[in-house]
Image (tube, rainbow, N blue to C red):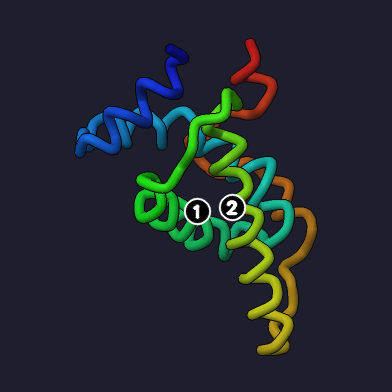
Amino acid sequence: MDDDERLLRAIRDGDGESFGVLYDRTRGFLLTCVIAPRVGRTDADDVLSETYRTALEKIGTFEWRGVGVVRWLASIARRKTLERVRQRARAGTRDEALDSVFEVPDGVPSAEAEMI
């Protein structure tokens, strides 16, 4: 059994600490690679929260297919990010300057650091 699969089973069984482990493992990637480049730092934390809330609500329907749980979370994050972009477009809100979009949020290791 894969480590991700064990983690998901524990979360389904109500283990909040396991959800914290999942959060710690995936937060940096989702913020820096999926969410922040599209919505900016201003909205990134809100979109991340929505992503994990949705994941927690739908964890019972997740079917293990042998791919890492990060792919599932990334697909949720992409949808939530797209919803935020569309919401901002309807409201006429301008995106923030690109320089701040590419900054790594405080306390989040860079993708390179995570690989090492």
Quarter of the image that includes the N terminus: top left
> At 29% across and 35% down in the image, what residue appears?
11
> At 41% across and 37% down in the image, what residue appears?
23
Kind of element beneath mark 2: helix
User: Which image quadrant for residue 97?
Assistant: bottom right
> At 51% across and 34% down in the image, what residue appears?
26
Q: Which mark is residue 9?
A: none
Q: Which residue is mark 1?
A: 48
Task: Provide residue 76's location: percent of width, then percent of height.
Answer: 57, 52
> At 71% across and 54% down in the image, what residue appears?
101
Please, which residue is most extreme toward the right here?
Answer: 98
Three-letter code, disc 1? Leu
Q: Which residue is mark 2?
A: 77
Quarter of the image that includes the C terminus: top right
Is disc 1 in contact with disc 2, using a CB cutoff of under 8 Å?
yes
Task: Provide residue 74's location: percent of width, then percent of height.
Answer: 61, 44
Kind of element beneath mark 1: helix
Task: Provide residue 111's location: percent of width, then percent of height.
Answer: 66, 27
Three-letter code, disc 2? Ala
User: Which image quadrant for residue 32?
Assistant: top right
- Sequence order check, earlier mark of 1 and 2: 1
Relative to 38, 27 lies left or right: left
Task: Provide residue 115's location: percent of width, then percent of height.
Answer: 65, 16
The residue closer to the viewer here, 41 or 1, is 1
User: Which image quadrant for residue 92?
Assistant: bottom right
The residue closer to the viewer here, 64 or 95, is 64
- Cα separation, mark 1 vs mark 2, equals 7 Å
Query: Vertical placement of 40 versus 114: above or below?
Result: below
